[in-house]
Amino acid sequence: MGGLDNGIMSSALTTLIHSFHVSASWGAWMITIYTLGLAVSVPIMAKLSDRYGRKRMFLISVVLFGLGSMSVALSHNFTLLLISRVLQSIGGGGIFPIANGYVVATVPVERQGRALGMIGGMNGIAAILGPNIGSFLLSLTNDWHWLFWINVPIAVLLVIFGARSITESKAPTKGRLDTLGIIVLSVGMLGLMYGLTNLKGANLLDSLVTPQVYGFVGVGIVLLIIFLWYESVIDRRGDDPLIPMSFLRPELRWTLAIGLASGLLLSSVIFLPAFVQLFLGWPASQAGYWYTPMALFSGVGAMGGGAFMDKRGPITTLIFGFVTAAIGSALFPLWVTTTWQMVIASSLVGLGIGITLGAPLNFMITERVPDNKSTALGILSLVREVGLTLGPTIFSGFLTRSMAQFPQEIVKNLGAIGISPSQVPSSELARMKGVQSFGDLTGQIHQIPSVPIQKAILKALHDVSSQGFGHLYWAAFVIAVVSLLFILLAGMYRRRSVSKTSTLPAQS
């Protein structure tokens, strides 16, 4: 249900913008405010589940998500819709970390890979079904409200079956709940994430020195430093910190670094429909369907990677996953020129990402954490969310910078066929005027009556998109390769930790 909502929301975004008569920048807040809500709610809901019961907090999360969905469907103004999205995010922030936490707390270690892989596989399946269900319901009902009503019966069924079949599980508690830590972390993460959403990919360095970025990011970092100091005080005092200091051991720090890289790498896949449309020439109405092979292999990778991890361990599984994703990313600029080649490359990327996001990271972040397993998974989800927020800004910058060359490429291609820009009707030039980013350009270009001019402009679009997407996928390749270094470091510290643990009885 949580995974479906992201795809459904993406298919409804344009419709909602028109329905509430808001600008595109305001419409983006339907996504932004959900992301900010997740950043705050994920670690808090995870901690509360460890303290008060994973079953209880999971059911509460599902209820909140269902109520948020119902409130979105009933929204009669844009303000109420945004408030409803916040309620959705609070519930959504607890669903996956608590579900994974329940698995690692109750399932035997030798079978955790398969169980975690099944949960991770839901992301791939939801990624396939979400946009398709959204588009289908929109075309069937011509009413965006049904896109959110669909979550309500799912939530009701989850609560009924969950209440009957899930047994309660929670960690031993000590001291008082760290209320002040919750407040400081919440404000710090809001500042950091909001600042990151204000970054501009086309002018990344320039946007870093704007108050909307450095002001909020700076305040967020300062508050997070204060938060960590305060948590260390709470930990030494014997109370119950939101984030125990044991989570900052070297092997866990490098595991979190891998989690950040996995979020960055995952964010690169959202540009696949644009690649299919602009580089391969598919119409916008069909471009999204070519996301299906990648999403399908992501689900296969998550479930298969879990079984592989049970046999070969998390480090080998992570290496295999990131190497597969790196190969798939490199194939885009080196090899892909046709649709079937794109399917192969994107399937490799999906397979690799599915393997990395499924079981191994969730296992590694919790294997040395005896009690607060949901909390550890919440921190991992939070770090991954930072990568998912930062990644699109970086990747879109490559596309936007290449798009700046679009007018010059048009002039060059027209000159190559003996047409001067002065010979092009002003109405056709106006069609291209002011274009600053990749969008639904192919539809506009195909409306040009002159076939030679149309072909020249399409070639210009193909050339600049080739450059932009080439840089994008090489950046994804570099992220995957750097992740391999993080994995080796995490593996080294993990072996040291295991060695120390195994020698403790002899030393005592």
Image (cartoon, rainbow, N blue to C red):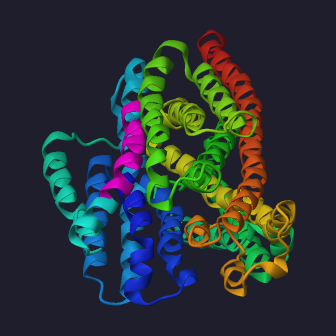
Residue 253 vertical placement versus 41 (above, below)? above
Residue 90 location (% of width, % of height): 40, 66
Residue 476 location (% of width, % of height): 71, 43
Residue drawn at x 70%, y 61% as measured from the top left: 396
Q: In the image shown, does 205 or 315 lie closer to the viewer?
A: 205
Residue drawn at x 77%, y 39% as measured from the top left: 478
Task: Judge whether residue 17 can be spotted in this image.
Answer: yes
Residue 311 vertical placement versus 118 (above, below)? above
Residue 432 location (% of width, % of height): 70, 77
Type of secondary structure dominating the magenta stretch:
helix
Which quadrant is home to the C terminus?
Answer: top right
Q: Does the magenta stretch include residue 364?
A: no
Residue 194 location (% of width, % of height): 63, 73
Q: Seen in the image, is 52 located left or right of residue 146? A: right
What is the span of residues highlighted in magenta in the rendered image?
117-133
Q: Seen in the image, is 120 located left or right of residue 135? A: right
Q: How many labels does the image show?
A: 0
Residue drawn at x 45%, y 25% as measured from the top left: 306
Q: In the image shown, does 71 or 23 lie closer to the viewer?
A: 23
Q: Seen in the image, is 122 located left or right of residue 306? A: left
Q: In the image shown, does 217 or 484 lie closer to the viewer?
A: 484
Q: Is residue 128 magenta?
A: yes
Q: Seen in the image, is 267 located left or right of residue 369? A: right
Which quadrant of the structure image shows residue 89?
A: bottom left
Task: Judge whether residue 2 can be spotted in this image.
Answer: no
